[in-house]
Image (spheres, rainbow, N blue to C red):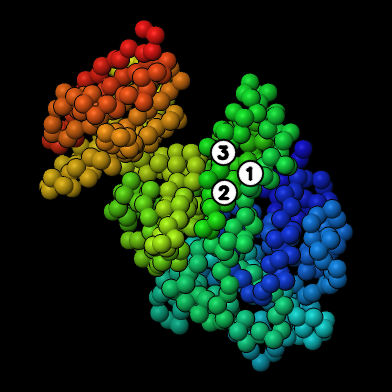
């Protein structure tokens, strides 16, 4: 089986025998149900392939769709003039790059359809080309714009400047104005348009990029198109039965075990109230190609714009995840670096996990283990004093947990926590000190979530601070700030936190930890081993 890793051209995938997950029934519904659309999806989620597929459909390339669902749905296969703009592959951090990109596209189209000599305005030139294409071909034009927001994201909150009309302005503002003028053509050219699709990561609704033309129909959370990009469970089992079996043979796992591991690692994205989950296609294809369950999507790069936004952010990630939000809090991008939640969500690092129809609120959390581990590694790398050591620290802690070495675990935790002393001591208010303490513990525990890690897990008698499950051990942690480890240990016993594991064959440890706000690290560490079933 050939996997189209890094290939976004529909024709190449079909002609050269790469695996293709058929979405053409949804594409047919899309093109026959409306006219101007916008779709937001995370990077490497199949947006470019969708655009390429639409391009070949509107060019009437029927032969490429042989055997796909749309072959029986479409009867006419008409050829339309297609105008495809792809902002991928260009670096817009330099002044003039965006203007040159647009001018090059317009010049190429004008060579085919003619130029409006009286104007150098990109919007007017584009409108004229669309009108002429309609007149000359007898069919309305199709406009496909891939990653429309990249020119803004490349310079978002970067501080880059340029000179315009003798005045220094932000490059971000200039790009926004250029795009607004370019996209405004769609309103005046409406009579000459058959279909328009813009894709991107974000929807800049409050910064006027879309204000110059009729608002597109937003598919980003539309229930009919929530699986348009990504791979559903049914598609996974239908198209990839062979590599699933190969993974099982490679790692000596049953087919059910492989499926469970794939779900934990790469599934969990939801893009509507339907709650139909989709897997990350980039990670799945790389996993099947290498027969390794690695963090492929996250390792392909953390967007620089997100790193810049998080640098301004004083909120803690543990205060953002696993919470309900109204749609206006995360759906539309707010041009405010102090509120990065919409960008975190739209970039794919958080997703919808539940919906409350009565209140019209959405529960947001990490989609899967790959994203959680990767995002936490970025945050912890900037939080602790020695970010380069965090990966080796995680490996050392993993060894200690696997071996049941509590003394080693205490040393490792003490060492890492001591690196955050300066953060906790700078907080004069006890409440702020406790807040940073909770955040520190959250990052530490999430960093070791190679195993099943449950933070603030609800039980019948209360909420457990943390439970870590490994193949041979179960650790129940209770943390106190400026209290005592004995109090923490006693709470575990009194609340019966270990009862759910009384018939578990693994070795179980109850661990009470007391931290000092003065030193910012462990003051006391007490552990107690419980007898396992049969002992």
**255, 115: nearer the viewer:** 255
> Is mark 3 in CB contact (under 8 Å) with mark 1?
yes
Residue at left offset 37%, top offset 34%? 454
**86, 483: nearer the viewer:** 483
Residue beneath disc 2: 277
Q: Secondary structure at mark 2?
A: loop
Q: Earlier in the sequence, mark 2 or mark 3?
A: 3
Q: Earlier in the sequence, mark 1 or mark 2?
A: 1
**Taking 64 as reference, is 311 left or right?**
left
Disc 2/disc 3 C-alpha distance (Å): 10 Å
> Is mark 1 in CB contact (under 8 Å) with mark 2?
yes
Rendered-image quadrant of the C terminus:
top left
Badge 2, how many Cα within 10 Å: few under 14, some, many 20+? many
Residue beneath disc 1: 233
**Taking 445 as reference, is 138 left or right?**
right
Q: Earlier in the sequence, mark 3 or mark 1?
A: 1
Q: Is residue 374 above or below residue 355?
A: above
Disc 1/disc 2 C-alpha distance (Å): 7 Å
Tell me where residue 416 appears, x and y as whole percent: 29, 31
Q: Secondary structure at mark 3?
A: helix
Q: Is residue 350 above or below residue 103?
A: above
Badge 1, how many Cα within 10 Å: few under 14, some, many 20+? some
Residue beneath disc 3: 263
Residue at left offset 82%, top offset 83%? 138
Q: Within the image, what quadrant is residue 360 found in? A: bottom left
**385, 351: nearer the viewer:** 351
Q: Secondary structure at mark 1?
A: helix
Residue at left offset 56%, top offset 38%? 263
Disc 3/disc 1 C-alpha distance (Å): 9 Å
Q: How many marks?
A: 3
Tell me where residue 440 appears, x and y as whole percent: 28, 39
**Taking 139 as reference, is 329 left or right?**
left
């Amino acid at each position: 089986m050939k996997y189209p890793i890094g290939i976004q051209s529909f024709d190449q995938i079909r002609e050269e025998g790469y695996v293709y997950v058929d979405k053409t029934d949804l594409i047919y519904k899309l093109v026959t149900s409306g006219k101007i659309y916008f779709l937001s999806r995370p990077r490497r989620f199949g947006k470019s392939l969708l655009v390429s597929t639409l391009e070949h459909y509107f060019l009437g390339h029927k032969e490429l769709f042989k055997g796909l669902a749309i072959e029986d749905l479409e009867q006419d296969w008409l050829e339309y003039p297609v105008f495809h703009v792809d902002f991928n592959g260009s670096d817009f951090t330099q002044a003039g790059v965006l203007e040159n990109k647009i001018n090059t596209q317009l010049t190429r189209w004008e060579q085919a359809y003619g130029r409006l000599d009286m104007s150098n305005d990109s919007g007017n030139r584009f409108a004229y080309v669309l009108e002429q294409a309609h007149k000359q071909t007898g069919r309305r034009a199709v406009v496909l714009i891939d990653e429309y927001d990249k020119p803004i994201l490349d310079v978002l909150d970067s501080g880059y400047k340029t000179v315009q009309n003798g005045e220094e302005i932000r490059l971000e503002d200039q790009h926004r104005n250029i795009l607004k003028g370019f996209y405004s053509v769609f309103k005046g050219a409406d009579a000459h348009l058959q279909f328009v699709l813009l894709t991107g990561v974000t929807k800049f609704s409050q910064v006027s990029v879309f204000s110059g033309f009729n608002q597109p129909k937003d598919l980003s959370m539309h229930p009919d198109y929530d699986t348009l990009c990504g791979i559903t469970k049914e598609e996974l089992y239908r198209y990839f039965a062979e590599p699933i079996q190969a993974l099982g043979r490679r790692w000596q796992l049953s087919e059910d075990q492989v499926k469970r591991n794939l779900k934990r690692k790469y599934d969990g994205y939801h893009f509507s109230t339907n709650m139909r989950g989709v897997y990350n296609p980039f990670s799945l294809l790389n996993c099947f190609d290498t027969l390794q369950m690695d963090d492929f999507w996250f390792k392909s790069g953390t967007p620089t714009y997100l790193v810049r936004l998080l640098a301004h952010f004083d909120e803690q990630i543990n205060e953002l995840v696993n919470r309900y939000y109204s749609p206006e809090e995360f759906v539309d991008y707010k041009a405010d670096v102090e509120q990065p939640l919409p960008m975190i969500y739209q970039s794919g690092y958080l997703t919808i996990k539940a919906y409350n129809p009565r209140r019209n609120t959405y529960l947001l959390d990490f989609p899967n283990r790959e994203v959680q581990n990767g995002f936490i590694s970025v945050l912890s790398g900037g939080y602790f004093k020695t970010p380069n050591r965090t990966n080796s620290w995680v490996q050392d802690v993993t060894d200690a947990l696997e071996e049941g070495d509590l003394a080693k675990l205490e040393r490792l935790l003490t060492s890492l926590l001591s690196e955050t002393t300066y953060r906790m001591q700078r907080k004069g208010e006890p409440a702020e000190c406790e807040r940073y303490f909770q955040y520190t513990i959250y990052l530490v525990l999430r960093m070791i979530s190679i195993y099943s890690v449950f933070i603030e897990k609800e039980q019948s008698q209360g909420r457990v601070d943390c439970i870590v499950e490994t193949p041979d051990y179960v650790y129940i942690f209770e943390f106190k700030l400026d209290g005592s480890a004995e109090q923490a240990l006693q709470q575990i016993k009194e609340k019966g936190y270990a009862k759910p594991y009384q018939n578990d064959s693994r070795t179980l440890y109850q661990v009470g930890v007391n931290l000092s706000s003065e030193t910012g690290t462990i003051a006391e560490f007490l552990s107690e081993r419980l007898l396992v079933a049969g002992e």
